[in-house]
Image (cartoon, grey):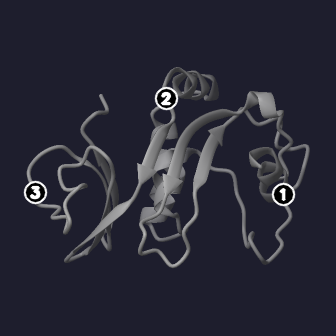
Amino acid sequence: AAVREALEEAAVVLDPASLVWFSHWTPPPVSIKRYATWFFAAAAPDRGVAEVTIDGGEIHEHGWARPADALDRRNALEIELAPPTWITLEQLARFATVDEALAGFAAAEPERFATRFALVDDGAVALYHGDAAYDDDEPDPAKPGGRHRLWMLSSGWRYERDDWS
């Protein structure tokens, strides 16, 4: 499915053996649409070989960007990103090269994310395993303790995670 989606959505042909599974996402039970999504990484071949087709359905625009640039563009309100995409870009931005990212992902167990939300005055906070408020019936982002969350505020988004060095 990942190889098919890369071809359909980005006109990138990948070898299934090159894929490195690094995360799994499940939205909260209150979501209108629930889906389980597996995220994979692979080195892309020369992207000048194929052209992405703007289909007006799933793809309205496209562009290639470095992870940090995409994060900046989202906070400048130039593009929209879903929370899993934001956190994936944060993960990718920690690596200097594609080879480093693939090696880093391959060396670790794939991470599972099951999202919980809490509302705050300026927006929302997505909470993930390891966050002090994650397991609470009514999560309170002010609760002291460990942090693993995405702040989605009108002033910008920010990922906070204690276990990253």
- The residue at the point 46 percent across, 74 percent down is 31
Helix, strand or loop status at disc 1: helix
Q: Are marks 1 and 2 in contact (CB under 8 Å)?
A: no
- The residue at the point 53 percent across, 42 percent down is 23
- The residue at the point 88 percent across, 55 percent down is 51
Residue 154 in the image, given as x and y percentages of width and height: 32, 74
Image side of residue 39 versus residue 25, left or right: right
The front one of 96 and 3 is 3
C-alpha distance separating marks 1 and 2:
28 Å
Which residue of the protein is positioned furthest toward the left in this rendering?
144
- Residue type beneath disc 2: Glu
Residue identified by numbered label 3: 143
- Residue type beneath disc 1: Glu
C-alpha distance separating marks 3 and 2:
28 Å
Mark closer to the observer (1, 2): 2
Number of marks in the rendered image: 3
* Dot 1 or dot 2, earlier in sequence: 1
Residue identified by numbered label 1: 8
* Dot 3 or dot 2, earlier in sequence: 2
* Dot 3 or dot 1, earlier in sequence: 1
Residue 72 in the image, given as x and y percentages of width and height: 46, 56
Image side of residue 145 versus residue 26, left or right: left
Residue identified by numbered label 2: 109
Residue 18 in the image, given as x and y percentages of width and height: 75, 28
Helix, strand or loop status at disc 3: loop
The front one of 135 and 17 is 135
The quarter of the picture where the C terminus appears is top left
- Residue type beneath disc 3: Lys
> Would you call the spot at circle 2 few (<14 residues within 10 Å), some (14-19), or many (20 or more)?
few
The front one of 139 and 120 is 139
> Would you call the spot at circle 1 few (<14 residues within 10 Å), some (14-19), or many (20 or more)?
some
